[in-house]
Amino acid sequence: YNQALANMNAGRLQEASRKFAAIDRQHPYSEYARKSMVMGAFANYRQGNYDEAIASAKRYLTLYPSSDDAAYAQYIIGLSYYRQIKDVTQDQKEARQTIQAMQDLVQRWPESEYVEDAKAKMRFANDQLAGKEMQIGRYYLERREYIAAVKRFRTVVENYSNTRHIEEALARLVEAYYAMGLTDE
């Protein structure tokens, strides 16, 4: 375990990950195995091996749901999803997963030191989801598919009212309603 920590501190994350995994295999359910599991998740996260980090952290939470490091493991899951969020022109599955993971953190460990950052990551992910809705709405508006565009803009207004896209959504709604001749709307 100490060698793995030394490797991690020296920047040899791949070697640290291997050693943390070896501890878990050779001494399962020991105190060092428990610590190694969460440290291995962190090392994988730092290397950009997000799927492995998520799997390791989820396994940790399954085995040790009430340990001191459980909130940190949940935070690693959320960060791993957060780092994979793509541009608004692509699928936003990771943004939804980030929100879910960070909400779990905030609900289960409200006193955790990671809560404030988790809330910031959730705000960013919500902004991404709103941006995706706006992008689709603008696409429909350009093609004069006003009902579909209105539906997307209304989704932003109703579900993402605390994002930076709310002003444009309202303006685009007015534009679409005028184009349909619904001046009362």
Image (spheres, rainbow, N blue to C red):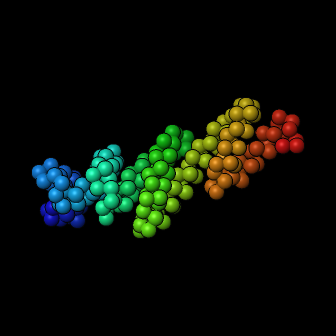
Tell me where residue 60 appears, x and y as whole percent.
29, 53
Note whether 45 is above or below 172 in the view shown. Answer: below
Residue 43 shows in this picture? no
Tell me where residue 64 appears, x and y as whole percent.
29, 56
As drawn, the residue found furthest toward the front would be: 66
Foreground: 47 or 119? 119
Foreground: 38 or 49? 38
Tell me where residue 61 appears, x and y as whole percent.
32, 53
Tell me where residue 44 appears, x and y as whole percent.
28, 52
In this rendering, position of residue 130 left or right of residue 84 = right
In this rendering, position of residue 93 left or right of residue 58 = right
Residue at 49% x, 51% y is 99
User: Quadrant location of the C terminus?
Assistant: top right
In this rendering, position of residue 87 left or right of residue 18 = right
User: Quadrant location of the N terminus?
Assistant: bottom left
Residue at 74% x, 33% y is 147
Note whether 32 is above or below 127 in the view shown. Answer: below
Note whether 9 is above or below 50 in the view shown. Answer: below
Note whether 53 is above or below 67 in the view shown. Answer: above
